[in-house]
């Protein structure tokens, strides 16, 4: 089995894992805003994964989903951080991504795979990094008085996931059109990190309950 075949098989784990995590969140998570946030995010990921598979089989092109998912993912985490911190900065941070998304909807030819390039996903993941660093700033500002292990782990997990995604989607045109099989190793790494993020993110938010870090 070569790496391209391995990527295909491992990709099947994404909808399976998401389905299990959704059920787990419904059954285990304490009733709170965070519970509905994580369930909503996981359902969004599952819908986009299934829709991407469908569009790929029907049209051999699901690139238009990349900026859509980037914007919606950022909105979910902006709302989560706003709930945790009560800082409107977390909501305002989604504005640049929204503006770029609207611009690309009118300018990017998603059918032109050879010249395809979208920066909405890159900017959205960059915004996730800023959200994570903003939380670190709040911890330093309060001298770690509001430190919570699960919240810190959630933040660290998001930072790792967003950092890799930011680097992954910047050269997306190269990864799509590169003829070398080496690109599949990047795809494999992306799937692996994403799956780990889904699992850790769900586990941590389910343990957070009603914890907040207002400051």
Image: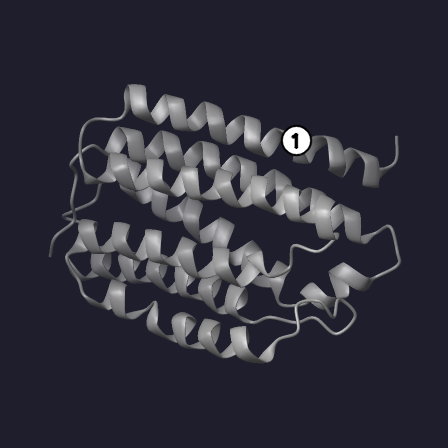
> Looking at this rendering, what residue extends furthest in the front direction?
58
- In the rendered image, the residue lying farthest to the left is 215
Crowdedness near tag 1: few (<14), some (14–19) or many (≥20) residues, C-alpha within 10 Å: few
Question: Relative to the observer, which residue lies in front, 22 or 167?
Answer: 22
Residue at position x 39%, y 75% in the image? 96
Q: Quadrant of the N terminus?
A: top right
Q: Where is residue 144 drawn, in percent x and y?
A: 19, 50
* Residue 194 vs residue 142, the one in the foreground: 194
In the visual, does 24 lie left or right of 176? Answer: left
The count of marks equals 1
Where is residue 73? Give x, y as percent: 42, 53
Q: Is residue 7 left or right of residue 208?
A: right
Which residue lies at the image location 59% right of the left edge and 61% below the top edge?
64
Is 124 situated above or below 55? below
**Residue farthest along the top direction in this orientation:** 27
The reply to whether residue 23 is visible in this rendering is yes
Choose top left, top right, bottom left or bottom right for residue 130.
Answer: bottom left
SS at circle 1: loop
- Circle 1 sits on which residue? 12
What percent of the width, then of the height, locates residue 214? Answer: 12, 52
Q: Residue at x 41, y 77 (%)?
A: 99
Q: Position of residue 215 (x, y in %)?
A: 11, 57
Applied colour scheme: one colour
Q: Is residue 143 visible?
A: no
**Image quadrant of residue 42?**
top left
* Residue at the spot 82% in from the left edge and 35% down from the top edge: 5
């Amino acid at each position: 089995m070569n790496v391209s075949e391995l990527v295909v098989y491992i990709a099947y784990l994404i909808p399976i894992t998401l389905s299990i995590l959704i059920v787990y969140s419904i059954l285990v998570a304490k009733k709170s805003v965070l519970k509905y946030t994580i369930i909503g995010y996981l359902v969004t990921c599952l819908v986009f994964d299934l829709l991407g598979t469908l569009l790929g089989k029907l049209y051999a092109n699901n690139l238009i989903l990349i900026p859509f998912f980037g914007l919606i993912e950022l909105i979910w985490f902006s709302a989560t951080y706003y709930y945790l911190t009560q800082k409107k900065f977390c909501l305002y941070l989604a504005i640049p991504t929204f503006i770029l998304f609207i611009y690309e909807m009118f300018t990017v030819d998603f059918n032109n795979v050879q010249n395809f390039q979208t920066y909405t996903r890159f900017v959205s993941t960059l915004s996730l990094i800023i959200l994570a660093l903003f939380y670190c700033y709040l911890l330093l500002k309060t001298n770690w008085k509001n430190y919570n292990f699960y919240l810190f782990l959630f933040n660290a997990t998001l930072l790792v996931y967003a950092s890799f995604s930011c680097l992954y989607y910047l050269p997306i045109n190269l990864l799509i059109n590169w003829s070398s099989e080496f690109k599949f190793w990047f795809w494999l790494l992306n799937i692996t990190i994403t799956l780990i993020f889904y699992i850790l993110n769900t586990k941590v938010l389910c343990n957070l309950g009603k914890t907040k870090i207002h400051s």
